[in-house]
Image (tube, rainbow, N blue to C red):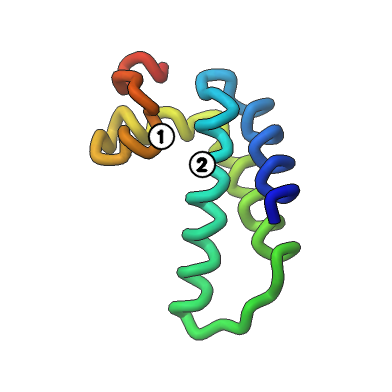
Amino acid sequence: MHEYHERLASMLLEKNRDITYEQALTWVELLWEDFESTYAKAGRDYMGSEMTEKVVRQWIEHYGGQLHEFVARNPKYKHLLGQGKEPSDLH
């Protein structure tokens, strides 16, 4: 699974130059876990890492360039995504 995360983090960095590799990796891990937990809560059968990668890849393609703006609007996530930076520093 680590290979999936690294590949997706690299893809996110191509879409968004306003974040670090560590932040991209954190984003990928959060999106990955969010999809899998939401899918499970909906009572769906686990479709494997390939399906999760496909969904996270689509999210990155559509929203990757704006993900850093999320911290500015949601300061409670700063400790997860800002890594010591002020939200205004992430623009």
Q: Which residue occupies 47% across, 34% down?
A: 67
Q: Position of residue 10 (x, y in %)?
A: 69, 33
Q: Is residue 53 left or right of residue 31?
A: right
Q: Percent position (x, y) of residue 83? A: 39, 27
Which residue is disc 2 drawn over? 27
Instruction: Give the amino acid at mark 1.
Output: Leu
The quadrant holding residue 55 is bottom right
Residue in the image at 54% along x and 31% along y: 22
For the C terminus, which image quadrant? top left
Above or below, 72 relative to 38:
above
Q: Position of residue 28 (x, y in %)?
A: 57, 45
Disc with the residue nearer the chain's start (2 vs 1): 2
* Pointer 1 residue: 81
- Badge 2 local density, few (<14 within 10 Å), some, or many (20+)? many
> Which amino acid type corresponds to the residue marked 2 in the rendered image?
Trp
Q: CA distance from mark 2 to mark 1?
A: 7 Å
